[in-house]
Amino acid sequence: MSRVDKSAPLGVGEEALQSFRNRLRGQVILPGDDSYDDARRIWNAMVDKRPALIVRCAGVSDVIDGIEFAQVNGLRAAVRGGGHNIAGNALCDGGLVIDLSPMKSVRVEPGARRVRAEPGVVWGEFDRETQMFGLATTGGVVSTTGIAGLTLGGGVGWLHAMYGLSADNLISADVILADGRLLTAREDENEDLFWALRGGGGNFGVVTSFEYRLHPLDKVLAGPVFHPAERAFDVLRFYRDFIATLPDELSVYAGFLTDPEGNGLIGLVSCYVGPVEEGERLVRPVREFGPPVADMVAPIPYTALQTMFDGAFPPGRQNYWKSGFLADLSDEALRIVVDYAAAMPSPTSMVMIENYHGAYSRVGPSETPYNNRDAHYDLLILASWADPAESDKNVGWARSFYEAVRPYLADKAFPNLMGQDEIEDRDRQAYGANSARLTEVKSKYDPTDFFRPNLNVKPSG
């Protein structure tokens, strides 16, 4: 239970606050309210911020009023969609949180293969609606991730090689700016803003509607094969050779984890989009190498793949992540990965190598803000533990791991996967030569840097 303090936020008069409440269709939640602690709780329990007020928006008008209230009263503002961001940018201390989580509408147009979705939707909800019509678009690897943050940061997922990133499939977006204007951004309207939204993060406004391109998809041939961690180095060398010539239809990720009995495992997780018979032929080397101690590859619904690893990423744990692109999968780099994975201090931590290729790589470096389309091997160091008293050793492991592997990393980064202490200094690695153009767009649409709790692009001046 939070401390009991139902006074108006610092600097805000009670009359102004009550007038604000009366205008909204949604809720205003203050410290001391029974729902306050639940409302400020997000997926990563390591994030413990105390907003002055939380505005749970029922619709666009609430968002506009929330922005105006923050502006008039000089309050810092953060924007929450699914609340799954590792760095905790969905919240801010002492400011106003524009909480979009109640905005859950999803409207599929099967004939046009398009869908409109509001920013409170998570991928499991999105997939439920689109898969009813045998359609899908690229959307993460965990169903509880929000569509908004993932898309605005690029949006990788199982379908990236076949259909590109989530941002590559964005057709249009409705955006509320810091001055309260509502704009539509697409290829032929506010084109510069549309470009910036496809990977430039939440720097430019609050997106209240996303329109995506959909693709036919029913079942996939997918699932992990597991090997004992003692064979991890050989498994990763096989993985390096196998992924060198993958077709667009097949994606394979590698990951270290601990099973319920405490045994270290390395898994290769495949996702094949296409005829099962051809998939069986292509995935056969993965299933036969070793041989594995467990083979869970099977034709399954796409929604089953999207929820398969939800249990490994539950809400309420302490999480601290580091990530970076390996320049290549050299033996030296792989040996460091294997050694540090073997020393994970928590059984719920993981290490992953995600290989990005195919349609992801065929987008030009200036077509979207994220320009690292030639970066293929994303190393994810995912420290996760339950007891806050164990934070030092788990954070220390992740940081030590990152420093050890740093000489083998490219000068590149993926916006979605940056951890708590990486946000301030890695925009150049994420955007490269596109940084100057992002600054121009930011200066035009958010010249006062109102939307700054994110991988911040600062306006000029």
Image: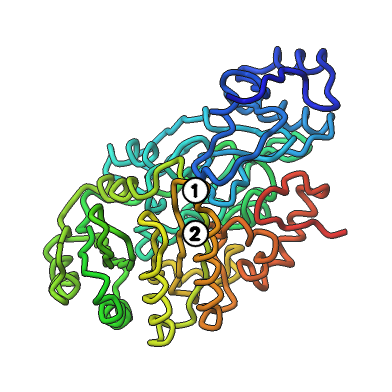
Q: Can you give x and y, in whole percent of width and height, for residue 328 in the image?
A: 44, 83
Which callout, 2 or 1, points to the residue nearer the camera? 2
Q: In which quadrant will I find the N terminus?
A: top right
User: Vertically, is 342 above or below 410?
Assistant: above
Asked if residue 355 lies left or right of residue 28, the reply is left
Name the residue located 43 percent from the left edge and 82 percent from the top edge.
333
Query: What residue is shown at x 75% (from left), y 34% (from top)?
Result: 180
The reply to whether residue 195 is in sight is no
Along the line of sight, which residue is nearer the eye, 346 or 242? 346
The answer to whether residue 122 is seen in the rendering is yes
**Left or right: 251 with respect to 4?**
left
Where 412 sits versus 217, above or below? below
Query: Hey, which residue is sitting farthest right in the picture?
Result: 461
In the image, residue 60 sits, relative to residue 347, either above or below, namely: above
Residue at the spot of label 1: 318
Label annotation for residue 394: 2
Pick the front one: 458 or 260? 260
Q: Which amino acid type is shown beneath numbered disc 1? A: Gln
Q: Secondary structure at mark 2?
A: helix
Q: Quadrant of residue 403?
A: bottom right
* Residue occupying image coordinates x 32% and y 50%: 309
- Tell me residue 406's x, y (percent): 55, 78
Q: Amino acid at mark 2?
A: Asn
Q: Residues within 10 Å of mark 1 (few under 14, many from 20)?
A: many
Q: Could you say which disc has been placed on residue 262 in the image?
A: none
Residue for point 39% across, 71% down:
357
Question: Image check: 9 left or right of 306?
Answer: right
Q: Is mark 2 in CB contact (under 8 Å) with mark 1?
A: yes
Q: Quadrant of the C terminus?
A: bottom right
